[in-house]
Image (tube, coloured by chain):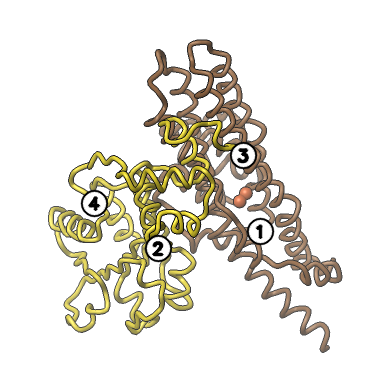
Amino acid sequence: MLINEEMKMAEVIHLNHHLLHVINRFGIQLGYGEKTVKQLCAEHELPLPFFLEIVNTFHDPSYFPVDAMLRFDAALLIRYLQQTHAYYLEFRIPEIEQYITRLTTDESWDEAVKRLIRDFFHQYVFELTQHIKREEDRVYPYVLALAHYLETGQGEKELVESLMHYSIQEYENEHDDVESKLFDLKNIIIKYIPRPKDSRILNLILHELFELEDDLHNHSHIENMILVPIVERMEKEFFALTRNGRHD
Amino acid sequence: MIEAVKILLIEPSYIIKEGLRSALGRLNLSFRIDEVDEVKENLVLTLEKFTPRIVFANHRALETKWAGNRSAAVFDEVLLVGMYNEKVTLFEMARYDEVLCIEENKQQIISSLQNILKKAGLLSNESETENLSEREREVLRFVALGLTNNEIAERLFISTFTVMTHRKNITRKLGIKTVSGLTVYAILNKIIESGEVNVF
Ligand SMILES: [Fe+2]
Ligand SMILES: [Fe+2]
């Protein structure tokens, strides 16, 4: 069953507590009382469809209604994507890091194995951080400037300037995949680690990796399938407007 | 291996979308569905955008946008399943790889889906425990040491294409896709020594 606007937020969590992190990203924190999804969205000035579609794509991983999501507001979407980045870098990764540290200080583990897992993970974190930094430094500001122009008519000169070097097409081409390494790390731990005396700490790490991978998958999918087409549409609008402006 | 199959569903009807999702959920298949109500520009562009492995398309939603031409390269990679709910001529449905009649009952739909997916090699009945062959271990060793496909081909006196086939099989058997992941596997299994390679 998909989440709908009439449900109480408390019921939503009872139905699927994995959604807590996602709901937090919209600025909605615990202490819901008897409030419904609709009421809480209104309180936080969030468009209902935006909240519902995103939460539902997490709730049911096979659900991804592209047509409905293409109607999202660009600035709102960027804010959500940034919150998601912050969640990875400030919360999820440090948490995994702690488990990895616990693993590496555990004497019962083979030194070489511990080092392999730790180095592999650190390399991954480095790549993920760079990926996110590129998006936040380059892509997102560009999208926001475009949205700002279409709304207010301001900033045309800067946009024309930056469009000489950059368009969303480039992002689409170079946007690389940040999940493959996680997928590998999971399989290495599940299948190929020499059998430990006690695997509880690895269970915790695995659990985290599964959650992170699913989350990243959803995030990249939104970037590729929703953000890119929305920006392509905005670029078209921008070109149409500036072209007319010049001739008039 | 446990990687989700990418499915694109082209269908305006909410009930049919949900129905197909639920039927697929009853199979031993991990999948992700992108859904669109219709194809807006043309089918080739849509396929290139979503890169699905399987497409389930409402025949009526597709027919005005696609006359059945399959010459574009993107068609090689996808299984096109046409869904119909009325008597259509065989001629009309011939453009699809498979067809699914949505008026069938639960058992029929599920078994049709099973047949379609089995033929495409996406549903396997037995989970084969597969070990790497001698040759695959050799290829893996070179990959882990950082050689390119061309270099490996030269060393082993085989074509680059064969190297790529071996790599695909290695990835499928182990469930490891990246070079650094394969390197870790190779070290853990003593295919190479950690001293032999600067891992990361
Ligand atoms: Fe991102
Ligand atoms: Fe990204």
Q: How many marks?
A: 4
Q: CA distance from mark 1 to mark 3?
A: 16 Å
Q: Chain of mark 2?
A: B
Which-is-in-front pick, marks 1 and 4?
Answer: 4
Q: Do tag 1 and tag 3 residues touch (Cβ < 8 Å)?
A: no
Front in this rendered view, residue B17 or A110: A110
Q: Do tag 3 and tag 4 residues touch (Cβ < 8 Å)?
A: no
Mark 4, residue position: B123
Mark 3, residue position: A25
Question: How far across and down, in percent of the image, does residue B193 sit?
Answer: 49, 32
Question: How far across and down, in percent of the image, does residue A140 sit?
Answer: 71, 55
Question: How far across and down, in percent of the image, does residue A78 sit?
Answer: 67, 52
Q: Disc 4 residue type?
A: Leu
Q: Is residue B106 left or right of residue A149?
A: left
Q: Do tag 2 and tag 3 residues touch (Cβ < 8 Å)?
A: no
Picture disc at residue B159? 2
